[in-house]
């Protein structure tokens, strides 16, 4: 079984959480978390990146699939932080489903 190092997801999550708690000017993450549209802006990005990922898969272009999936994962992490959801809670849910 592969044992991929996914610690970058934890690191990125911590950076996003830090942006929420200690806002920085010119931060893309802060521009999403503080957007006048509220959570709707983040949801727009999640939707956009989902569609771009689907199109990349349909286009059968591995590099684009990796690029767009990374955009999608990043925006999902921003959504978790905005909603007060931790990666531990996601991991816990996935573990519960293990057969
Ligand atoms: N991993 C990412 C990351 N992935 C994607 N993006 C941004 O997500 C956006 C993707 O949206 P699009 O492809 O639609 O590009 P766009 O043209 O800017 O789209 P619009 O927002 O204008 O609609 C781009 O602006 C990217 O720069 C990211 N921005 C930041 N990070 C990480 O978050 C950290 C904190 O970032 P700041 O908050 O900006 O300091 C950084 O150090 C990075 O590690």
Image (cartoon, grey):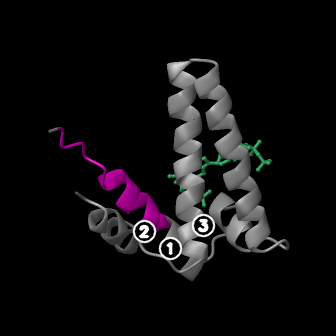
Q: Is residue 60 magenta?
A: no
Residue 51, position as x, y percentages in the image: 70, 40
Q: Residue at x 59, y 36 (%)?
A: 68
Residue 24, position as x, y percentages in the image: 63, 71
Disc 2 residue: CB within 8 Å of ligand 1: no
Residue span colored magenta? 2-15
Query: Which residue is the extreme one toward the front?
Result: 99
- Mark 1 vs mark 2, CA separation in Å: 5 Å
Q: Examine the image and state in which quarter residue 33 appears.
A: bottom right
- Mark 1 vs mark 3, CA separation in Å: 11 Å
How packed is label 1: few (under 14 Cα within 10 Å), some, or many (20 or more)?
many
Q: Secondary structure at mark 1?
A: helix
Res 14 label: 2
Residue 40, placed above or below residue 62: below
Would you name the residue on which mark 3 appears? Answer: 79
Q: Nearer the viewer, residue 95 or 40?
A: 95
Residue 80, placed above or below residue 49: below
Q: Residue at x 49, y 76 (%)?
A: 85
Q: Examine the image and state in which quarter residue 89 appears.
A: bottom left
How packed is label 3: few (under 14 Cα within 10 Å), some, or many (20 or more)?
many
Quadrant in which the N terminus is drawn? top left
Q: Secondary structure at mark 2?
A: helix
Judged left or right of residue 74, residue 39 is right
């Amino acid at each position: 079984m592969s044992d991929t190092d996914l610690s970058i997801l934890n690191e990125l999550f911590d950076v996003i959480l830090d942006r929420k708690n200690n806002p920085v000017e010119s931060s893309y993450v802060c521009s999403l978390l503080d957007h006048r549209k509220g959570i709707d802006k983040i949801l727009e990005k999640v939707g956009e990146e989902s569609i771009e990922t689907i199109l990349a898969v349909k286009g059968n272009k591995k590099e684009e699939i990796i690029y767009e999936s990374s955009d999608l994962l990043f925006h999902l992490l921003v959504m978790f932080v905005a909603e007060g959801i931790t990666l531990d809670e996601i991991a816990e849910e996935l573990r519960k489903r293990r057969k």
